[in-house]
């Protein structure tokens, strides 16, 4: 592991130096002159705290600083300028290491000045690894100091990692459960247009046979007329074919069948495209997402859940900027809110009646820093005494087998903890419920809240 760290440091210095000679070779700790100084950067690993440092006698640090600042070696620099330049060089090395080594999970800061003095026996007690570093024609010492983390810190870290793993597994489980629940509805949504496309193809196939008989009769009549032959019998045949084929009916129904088939194929394509967008796994890092496209896909794949109990009203801002987020997790949040709204409306309205409720989904950019997703329904609303509990894990008002109490808890975790956003709830008993999700337009974690 240590070797890979040094390789990463050397690689970063190569990238920075653009041709400057950078070499690392083994060196004895005793070879580092007493009174050497430089800079160190703290790095937090999984079980240790590391101090990565660059050390050298004053004259060598001065030459490095001159190279960093693009000045001749004879340039006079203050100690502060030297420390800053060496610290920046170290920061470049540690920055590359942070980006390319999974063992390091803390941020990096500008290197802190540090002296390295005392007899070799004392220094050996605190040093973990030492390498000789040649930067251009200047010899330096690259040092990695290692301190074990306390048992309490390791325990907290392991607990945090375990919680994160459980949350990831829970989100994956919920996503698989949602896809499973949607599968029957999606199959039905695809089956309906597929069925009438199939029926129309059979109709067009039969119709083509009838049209072909008519065309053959016309062709026989044309040949007889060109040859000057008697056409009476052929005219009678043509008349019979025209009557049997019912041309008026075919001319009316064939265009209709073609139009229905195009519509059916388009419906299937839209459902498949929506399922592809909805189920895209995404990556571990946030990526710019077209929010409107993701919401439209989620509405499409969940249609069977709400179509019998609600009319869907969609109001998506056209010029909405791309939002840095985890698309799969956010799709799951919107799906949970849609399904919850559909279930609430099913409880309020009889599915066999013509009366339906309404689900409204809107997006907008309130300011330069955030966008908002609004999901509202005209359901029965949430009683005031339980509103503060709806985001609690395992809390549900649904009957056994219909709800697990994890949907809104997961939504809160994704929006607040994972995206640094906020989720707000307003509800009026008998009139409906509205959820407002606010997402930052920057990847940096912002102040978050649940109201």
Image (cartoon, rainbow, N blue to C red):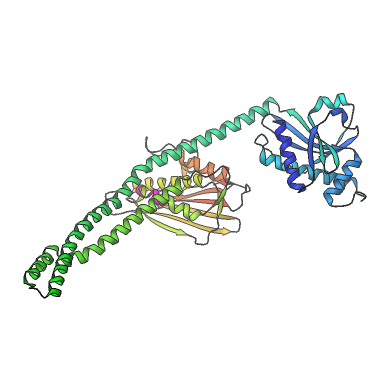
Residue 221 showing in the rendered view: yes
**In the shown orientation, is residue 354 left or right of residue 52?**
left
Q: Could you say which quadrant of the image residue 38 lies in? A: top right
Residue 109 showing in the rendered view: no
Near-viewer residue (223 or 203): 223
Magenta region, mostly helix, strand or loop? helix
**In the shown orientation, is residue 67 left or right of residue 47?**
right
Near-viewer residue (343 or 153): 153
Residue 211 located within the stretch drawn in magenta: no
**In the shown orientation, is residue 317 left or right of residue 194?**
right
Q: Could you say which quadrant of the image residue 28 lies in? A: top right
Measuring from the top left, give residue 60's x and y in whole percent: 89, 41
Measuring from the top left, give residue 242's x and y in whole percent: 13, 66
Q: Is residue 249 above or below residue 427?
A: below
Say which quadrant the N terminus sits in.
top right
Numbered range of the magenta stretch: 298-304
**In the shown orientation, is residue 180 left or right of residue 138?**
left
Measuring from the top left, give residue 252's x and y in whole percent: 21, 66
Q: Is residue 200 above or below residue 36?
A: below
Residue at point 50%, 44% (across, down):
329
């Amino acid at each position: 592991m240590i070797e890979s760290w040094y390789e990463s440091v050397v690689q970063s210095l190569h990238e920075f130096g653009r041709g400057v000679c950078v070499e690392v070779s083994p060196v004895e700790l005793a070879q580092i002159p007493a009174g050497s100084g430089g800079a160190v950067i703290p790095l937090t690993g999984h079980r240790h705290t590391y101090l990565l440092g660059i050390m050298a006698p004053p004259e060598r640090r001065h030459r490095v600083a001159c190279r960093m600042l693009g000045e001749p070696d004879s340039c006079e620099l203050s100690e502060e300028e030297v420390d800053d330049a060496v610290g920046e060089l170290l920061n470049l090395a540690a920055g590359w290491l942070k980006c390319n080594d999974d063992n390091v999970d803390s941020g990096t800061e500008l290197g802190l000045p540090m002296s390295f003095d005392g007899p070799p026996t004392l220094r050996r007690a605190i040093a973990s690894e030492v390498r000789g570093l040649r930067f251009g024609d200047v010899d330096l010492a690259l040092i990695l100091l290692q301190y074990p983390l306390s048992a309490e810190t390791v325990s907290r870290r392991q607990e945090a990692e375990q919680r994160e793993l459980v949350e990831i597994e829970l989100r994956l489980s919920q996503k698989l459960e949602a896809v499973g629940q949607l599968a029957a509805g999606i199959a039905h949504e695809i089956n309906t247009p597929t069925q009438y496309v199939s029926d129309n193809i059979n109709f067009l196939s039969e119709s083509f046979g009838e049209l072909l008989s008519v065309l053959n009769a016309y062709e026989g009549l044309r040949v007889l007329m060109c040859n000057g032959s008697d056409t009476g019998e052929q005219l009678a045949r043509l008349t019979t074919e025209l009557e049997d084929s019912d041309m008026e009916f075919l001319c009316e129904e064939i265009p209709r069948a073609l139009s229905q088939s195009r519509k059916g194929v388009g419906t299937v394509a839209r459902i498949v495209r929506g399922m592809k967008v909805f189920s895209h796994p995404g990556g571990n890092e946030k990526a710019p997402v077209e929010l409107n496209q993701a919401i439209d896909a989620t509405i499409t794949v969940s249609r069977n859940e709400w179509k019998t109990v609600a009319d869907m009203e969609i109001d998506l801002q056209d010029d909405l900027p791309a939002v840095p987020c985890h698309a799969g997790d956010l799709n799951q949040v919107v799906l949970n809110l849609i399904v919850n709204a559909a279930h609430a409306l099913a409880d309020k309205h009889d599915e066999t009646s013509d009366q339906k409720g309404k689900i409204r989904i809107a997006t907008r950019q309130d300011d330069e820093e955030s966008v908002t997703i609004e999901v509202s329904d005209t359901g029965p609303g949430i009683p005031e005494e339980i509103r503060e509990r709806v985001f609690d894990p395992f809390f549900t008002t649904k009957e056994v087998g219909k709800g697990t109490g994890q949907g809104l808890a997961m939504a809160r975790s994704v929006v607040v903890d994972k995206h640094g956003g906020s989720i707000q709830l307003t509800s009026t008993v008998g009139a409906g419920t509205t959820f407002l999700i606010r997402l930052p337009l920057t990847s940096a974690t912002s102040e978050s809240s649940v109201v």
